[in-house]
Amino acid sequence: MRPEEIERLVKISKDRPLLPETYVPWAEEPSPTDLYLPEFLTSLEGLAVYDTLTQQQKTDLGRHEAVQVLYSYGWGEALFCVFMTRYLLTLPPNGPEHRFLIREIIEEYRHQEMFAQTITQLKGQALPPTKMHAFVGKFSTNYLPADFLFMGSLAVELITDMYGNHTRRAPEIYVVLRKVFELHNIEEGRHIHFTKGLLENYTKKAGYVKRTLYSFVILMNIYFVRTMYVRKAIYERIGIPNADAVFKEATKNYRSKFTKNCLGHIIEFVNSWVGFNTATRWAWRWLLGARV
């Protein structure tokens, strides 16, 4: 990005900040007919068991799964802040890029607080990471080089943005959730200019091996996030009998729904810098059912 473009983004961030405290109508309580996640994104919609649920159970299913989405949003933002802090240390402090990153980090931490407050507003209790999730998160932040951490962070952002886009456009969704996702979408629109420039800088220098590794990092982060949403404990919470059997069905059902509704733009993104090759295609097909 040219310095004047960065300066313009810094000025917008300072002059027109979007503060969750005033942008989101926190005082609005949900109505009995409000939903928390579009039904087609829930893990049980499309299965026979879904038709046996009461309307309250369907609503609660969406609420609990929305909480998991918000939790992963916060996780992705925190991961991106780790990357940006690392990158920040390589820049001269008087340059426009340094000052822009400071503004972006401030906004990303505001987003994390907003997602946490939304979970509280939904009376949610996010399920903690499994041992596998905890290991991947710790390994990513502590040991991955900056460019690999960037790719992993970007993968999480792309997935969570897809959820946000579906949710903020659905009029049946609780207004607080719609405004939270709307605010996030507006500010991420500014951040994406910087992200695109950095992405191009990393990928244009990458040869076959590094592009292959980038592809695997993105794949594993997407798989990581996807498996945070479908949890047996949610079915137990809403009173579904035989939660073990339902969990197995839901896992298969959600895999196909995720591939259909959330992978399209991810595949386009990875394809744009030739991340699919003979070393990576099999893994994308096996883990995510991607048609690549």
Image: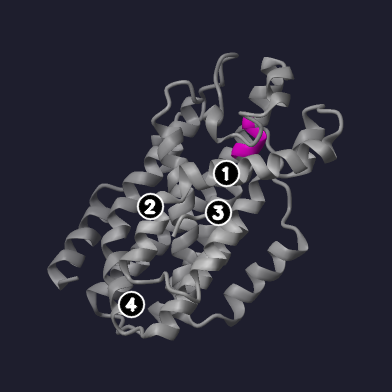
Residue found 49% across the figure and 33% down from its top? 177
- Is residue 221 among what the camera can see? yes
For the residue marked with disc 4, what is the amino acid?
Thr
The CA distance from mark 3 to mark 2 is: 15 Å
- 64 in magenta: yes
In the image, taking residue 180 as reference, residue 36 lies left or right, namely right
Which of the marked residues, 1 or 2, is nearer the chain's N terminus? 1
For label 2, the residue is 265
The CA distance from mark 2 to mark 4 is: 18 Å
Which of the marked residues, 1 or 4, is nearer the chain's N terminus? 4
For label 1, the residue is 256
The CA distance from mark 3 to mark 4 is: 25 Å
Image quarter (top left, top right, bottom left or bottom right) of the N terminus:
bottom left
Specify the quadrant of the image occupied by residue 237: top right
- Residue 289 is labelled as 3
Which of the marked residues, 2 or 4, is nearer the chain's N terminus? 4
